[in-house]
Amino acid sequence: MPDDSSTPAPSAGTSQSDVKWRRVVDASTRWPVIAFVVSGTFWLVAGSLLALIASFKFQFPDWWTQQAWLTFGRVRPAHLNTMIYGWISMAGVGVSAWLWARLLKTKLRGRGLLLLSAALWNVGVLVGTIGILAGYSRAIEWVEMPYAAFAFIVPAMGLLVVSFVRTLWHRHARHLYISVWYLGAAILWGPLLVIAILLPIYSGVPEATANWWYAHNILGLWITPPGLAAAYYLIPKVIGRPVHSYHLSYLGFWTLALFYNWAGVHHLVGGPAPQWVATVSIVFSAMMIIPVIVVAVNHHLTVVGHFKKLKYSPTLRFVVFGAMSYTAVSLQGSLQSFRYWQEVTHFTHYTIAHSHLGVYAFATMIAFGAIYYIMPRVTNWEWGSKRLVSLHFWTTGLGIGAYVTALTIGGVIQGLQLLDPDVAFLTIVEDTKPWLVVRSVSGTLMTVGHLVFAYLLAKIVVQSGERPDGPTYFHPVPAGTFDHVGGDGARSVPSGPAEESAQ
Amino acid sequence: MTRIALIFLGAFAAIAMSFTALTLLPRLQLSTVEPTPGTTDYTYSEQLGRDVYKQEGCMYCHSQQVRPEDFGSDVARGWGPRGSRPGDYVYDETHQLGTMRTGPDLHDIASRQPSRDWHLAHLYQPRSVSPGSVMPAYPYLFEVKKKSSVMASETTVPISPEYAPPGDSVVVATERALALYDYLMTLELEPMDREASN
């Protein structure tokens, strides 16, 4: 097993012993991964339905207004909390658990704790979602779920930390691959953030700065790291080359850790917070260009020259889509923190486009790609239909593309009109409507993709039907394309040339 | 110290520093801020109304932060005589600054729209007073009852004929609707000298 620090790429060894330890480690992660990924996917579907209700209310404002629990002002935060604490957090934990064990080359410890964690987490999100719809929202953006929900989620996070630390303690890997850095830091930052924002010590304007310190950091220090960790592992692994400039990735990690968490108050530019806080956040938002460029160099230059492989591999398609989106959303984020830009876009639908470019086009698409890679290895089965995988990719890819484009354009128009005091407010509302129609349509497309994905996931978890013959690729793969992944595959014996897909 | 310990320590130090700077220091700085003229603590009814505002998620479409005169055009649009200041929020236990303007900013709404009839009609059915509005209706904050059974203490809400209930029924405001109006009437920014700043 190579992995001395001079060749730090994930091992591409395909000897029998390499395959064997991987099989053992993968098997140890099976139930926790399945629990978290399946739970996350449930919340993805639930959150998508909430999203559609919220979006369609712009086309039909008098739709379902008799019942308080379906009013936009409750459905919208229910959607956000379900997606953040339900979908992307749980899917992120599932993916992280598999990566952690693989990269530390040891069995996942505390598997029972993780299963308990998944159960508590689900209860928490259920209590939280119902709580918001029932009128018990705490009315603090990004953390609206009542305390009762967090009474489950915080302990669930604690159990996760125990499991990961114990696994770390028993590690066999001498070198800690860069993904381990991101994941290790995330399990420290996540619980600290949630506990910090739940402390009953805030009010008034300081509460607002705390609010946005939290909301921005839950994105950058809890949701982002598993996405980057997965991309750093899966892109080199599936392409078959080491990361372009591995030692640069340490710089990327430390600059993310030191810069990202100061950026939160860029959400309050022009507001009543002290000027120095807003300025500090703008400065660090701009400095985020450094880690983003590092990650872009490492991810994109590793793929360059190998784009053809995206034709075949679902994992690669979703992960590269996500990695490119990360670069885009982060550079956009740096620019839009500047006062001149914000003066136009703050308070508009542009911001919603940006947030979905991050949480969906980046984090969610990478999560999909990682799940496509991981599930065959923990279920010892294969994805049931390349056509459905393709449908999933195109509905979600085109969906989010249309979503972001429409709300970006609509938001900028809205912002420019808001800056002109002669434009009547109801005119501005009227002009946003066509773009919001595109949102509803693209959201519907994405939801179709999610339902397809949930179906595929159910089939692979229960191992339904006949065992497919080989990895599910989009098209028959030319011999030798993915040989280097052979020792990592779901089958117990690495083959020579990759088999033609039987689908 | 092993490398992994260094990673954890570094990550912790990073978040501790930003928590201090972005959360604790502003708290300290603003702990002595005085309420601006006209800003007073909430009465029972106003606080109840504020709870309704929070529960129904008004914040997701309406902001409560008027931008200063040299940034954006909120003041020119008539949304307030001045930018909002920290002293406007000292009694807000849960801030409702908001981040979206699907609807107008409300921090000075009491100045530009004080009519109770307008607000109650708007909450019952926004499109009855604002054609083309996408705001949700809140019929559950009201009761529809026969005119003859309305008591003297109750508040009837005039609704335009297109949206009024049929026959001899009228719309009556519940306690929560009236409380929400009371809360909206606390949202008023009095002019101040430019020198007074945080």
Image: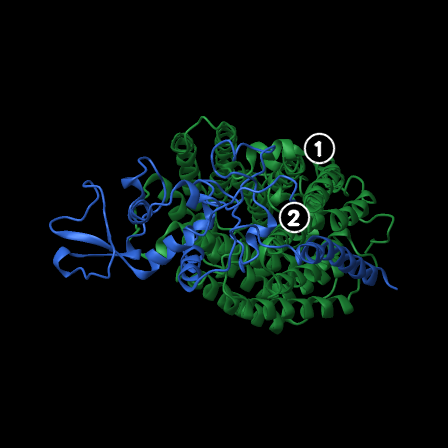
Chain colours: A green, B blue
Graded by Cα atoms within 10 Å as few (under 14), some (14 to 19) or many (20 or more), the crowding at tag 1 reads: few
Tell me what residue is drawn at x 20 percent, y 40 percent.
B162
Which residue is disc 1 drawn over? A304
Residue A47 sits above or below residue A503 on the image: below
B141 to the left or right of A380: left
Residue A156 lies, in percent from the top left, at 59, 69
Residue A23 lies, in percent from the top left, at 67, 61
Residue B186 lies, in percent from the top left, at 45, 52
Residue A478, visible in the rendered structure? no
Element type at marker 1?
loop
Q: Please tell me which residue lies in front, A62 or A32.
A: A62
Where is the N terminus of chain A found, in terms of image quarters? bottom right
Chain designation of label 1: A
**Amino acid at pointer 2:** Gly
**Location of residue A169 by image quarter:** bottom right
Tell me what residue is drawn at x 50 percent, y 39 percent.
B80
Chain designation of label 2: A
Which residue is disc 2 drawn over? A264
**Amino acid at pointer 1:** Val
Do the residues indicated by labels 1 and 2 lie within the same chain of the protein? yes
